[in-house]
Amino acid sequence: MLKYIRAAALSSLFVLAGCGSDPAPEPLEQIIVREPGTAPAIAAAPADAPASTLIADGKAAFANCSACHSLEQGAPNGVGPNLVGIVGQAAGEVAGFAYSDALKASGIVWTAAELDSFIADPAGKIPGTTMVAGAIAEPSKRQAVIAYIESVTAN
Ligand code: HEC
């Protein structure tokens, strides 16, 4: 605490110029903004939202998913498949998961943009999918959850 106060006082001159350069409270992975093909770069953080904040928001928003999906390397599939490495992967490819025919036939490769429209309305995007819950209406929350998923796959 003392150390923090002293550091804050000493570095106050740098606060304006150095916003975002302070060490994060936890050693979160940094977000890597990819440019997957021609997909819009919706994973880019707005200027006022440092990547660590976006990922922390996304981690919280993953509560919408975690009843059915794990984001831990090597963890078993649940009601839905393990999502580690899903960004950039073809739909329906997680080993040992029994997908719907609709999802297997979708031909989707999971870019951030494809994930965004799927999470917004799973059955609207893939009629017949067995993902019957977990949709997120708020675009900013979807962006955060995708950034979080991508941060886990990028290590
Ligand atoms: C009620 C359980 C449930 C919840 C909650 C849920 N999902 Fe799913 N999810 C599934 C099931 C089941 C499938 C397989 C769908 C199919 O085969 O049609 C799936 C499939 C997926 C896929 C396709 C995976 C692949 O290998 O092609 C993605 C991506 C996905 N979910 C992301 C999410 C995200 C992100 C959330 C939270 C915002 C979420 N899901 C919430 C059950 C769920």
Image: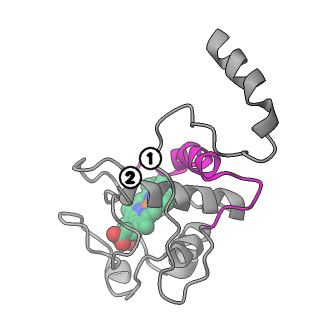
Query: Could you tell me which residue is drawn at 70 percent across and 64 percent down?
Result: 139
- Which label number is shown at residue 69? 2
Q: Which of the two residues, 109 or 13, is positioned nearer the viewer here?
A: 13
The 10 Å Cα crowd at callout 1, few under 14, some 14 to 19, many 20 or more, is some
Where is residue 83? Give x, y as percent: 36, 59
Give amino acid for label 1.
Answer: Ser
Q: Secondary structure at mark 2?
A: loop
The magenta span reads: 44-68
Which is more toward the observer, 37 or 13?
13
| Mark 2 surroundings: few (<14), some (14-19) or many (≥20) residues within 10 A | many
Q: Is mark 1 within 8 Å of ligand 1?
A: yes
Q: Amino acid at mark 2?
A: His
On the image, which quarter does residue 119 sit in? bottom right
Gap in Å between the C-alphas at discs 1 and 2?
Answer: 5 Å
Is 53 within the magenta? yes
Disc on res. 144: none
State left or right for residue 51 relative to residue 81.
right
Q: Is residue 52 above or below residue 25?
A: below
Residue 57: x and y in percent read 62, 46
Mark 2 close to ligand 1, CB under 8 Å = yes
Q: Residue at x 48, y 52 (%)?
A: 65
Q: Do callouts 1 and 2 mark residues in contact (Cβ within 8 Å)? A: yes
In the figure, 42 relative to 127: above or below? above
Which quadrant of the frame does ligand 1 lie within? Answer: bottom left
> Residue 21, position in %: x, y?
64, 44
Residue corresponding to mark 1: 66
In the rendered image, which quarter contains the C terminus? bottom left
